[in-house]
Image (cartoon, grey):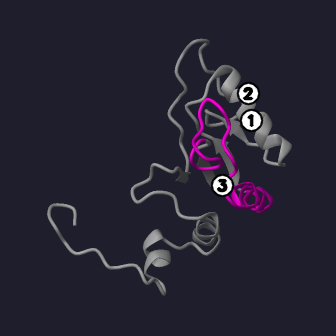
Amino acid sequence: MIIAVDFDGTIVEHKYPEIGKEIPFATTTLKMLMKEQHHLILWTVRKGKTLDEAVAWCKERGVEFYAINKNYPEEKVEEGGEYSKINADLFIDDLNLGGLPDWGQIYSMIKDNKTWKDIYTKGSNLPKQKKKGWFW
């Protein structure tokens, strides 16, 4: 599976342009996914020096991405140009609808082919949403 992973707010806490503290179990989970032969793409708005720092931070912790802000390592991005649209099977991003599940839940969803609804409703003490309008 090809998995695009955001950096700020997903792997680390938001402190841009600095690098925040690691979100618990983020790099451990990413290393497990790499070991299981998933292709991880770092998908971030960081560029230049801040991107290099994020890549180095991940590499120091044993997370090396298949590609960074592109679909495959050899893909050409025009100098000064914007990154291409990423084609992935799954996107892990703190700005997903509903926010970022914890990394244990993310791993379970990928490993056991579960949906967020499966995780959210199983044994959850969270209140059920009532229909309120167009989307609820």
Q: Residues within 10 Å of mark 3 (few under 14, many from 20)?
A: some
Q: Position of residue 107 (x, y in %)?
A: 64, 67
Q: Position of residue 135 (x, y in %)?
A: 21, 62
Q: Residues within 10 Å of mark 2 (few under 14, many from 20)?
A: few
The residue to which callout 1 is attached is 55
Three-letter residue code for mark 1: Val
Is 32 drawn above or below residue 115 in the view shown? above
The residue to which callout 2 is attached is 52
The residue to which callout 3 is attached is 23
Name the foreground residue: 47 vs 22.
22
Calculate the distance from the C-alpha at mark 1 to the C-alpha at mark 2. Answer: 5 Å
Q: Which residues are magenta?
A: 8-37
For label 1, the SS is helix
Q: Position of residue 14 (x, y in %)?
A: 57, 42
From the viewer's perspective, tell me whether residue 63 is left or right of residue 98: right
Tell me which residue sits at (56%, 47%) in the image: 9
Three-letter residue code for mark 2: Asp
Calculate the distance from the C-alpha at mark 3 to the C-alpha at mark 1. Answer: 16 Å
From the viewer's perspective, tell me whether residue 84 is left or right of residue 63: left
For label 2, the SS is helix
Name the foreground residue: 7 vs 65.
7
Is 30 drawn above or below residue 72 in the view shown? below
Residue 88 painted magenta: no
From the viewer's perspective, tell me whether residue 31 is left or right of residue 87: right
